[in-house]
Image (tube, rainbow, N blue to C red):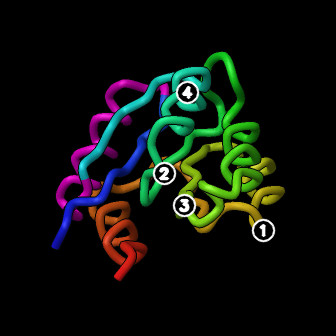
Amino acid sequence: MDQLTAFVIEDDRNLAQAFAEALEEADYKAEVIYDGETAKRRLAEVTPAIVILDLHIPHIKGTDILNYIRSDERLVDIRVIVATADNRLADELDDTADLILLKPVGFKQLKDLAARLRPQ
């Protein structure tokens, strides 16, 4: 199987690393991004297969990143998993994200979900 690119957009460095490791075990090449500005720049350069997105990140809000992905024709098919502790905001994004995971997110849970979302 070819390795697809996955972005982990998460400002908590420990959590971002755990998410990246789970994605790598699901056979993705994970790239960790810690802020919204860098995420938007990288999304302009690369089309990942999947994005794990925290909603509360520095510089550009996660909701703005999600809207950017969904409004760009080149990116619209990216699978987006929102990982957040914000229940209220998660409910508002139910129709926009492919999946919403409420933190804390388990390593195996994320690995299994990412593997199932992998394009065939």
CA gap, disc 2 and disc 4: 14 Å
Based on the picture, tell me whether residue 21 belongs to the magenta stretch. yes
Of badges 1 and 2, nearer the viewer stands: 2
**Badge 4 element:** helix
Q: Quadrant of the N terminus?
A: bottom left
**Badge 3 element:** loop
CA gap, disc 4 and disc 1: 25 Å
What residue is at 52 percent from the left and 22 percent from the top?
A: 38
Q: Is residue 107 left or right of residue 94?
A: left
Crowding at dot 2, Cα within 10 Å, few <14 / some 14-19 / many 20+, comes out as many
Q: Nearer the viewer, residue 56 or 6?
A: 6
Quarter assignment of residue 96: bottom right
Name the residue that disc number 2 marks: 51
Name the residue that disc number 4 marks: 41
**Badge 1 element:** loop
What residue is at 19 percent from the left and 67 percent from the top?
A: 2
Question: Residue 95 has which mark?
Answer: 1
Question: Residue 78 has which mark?
Answer: 3
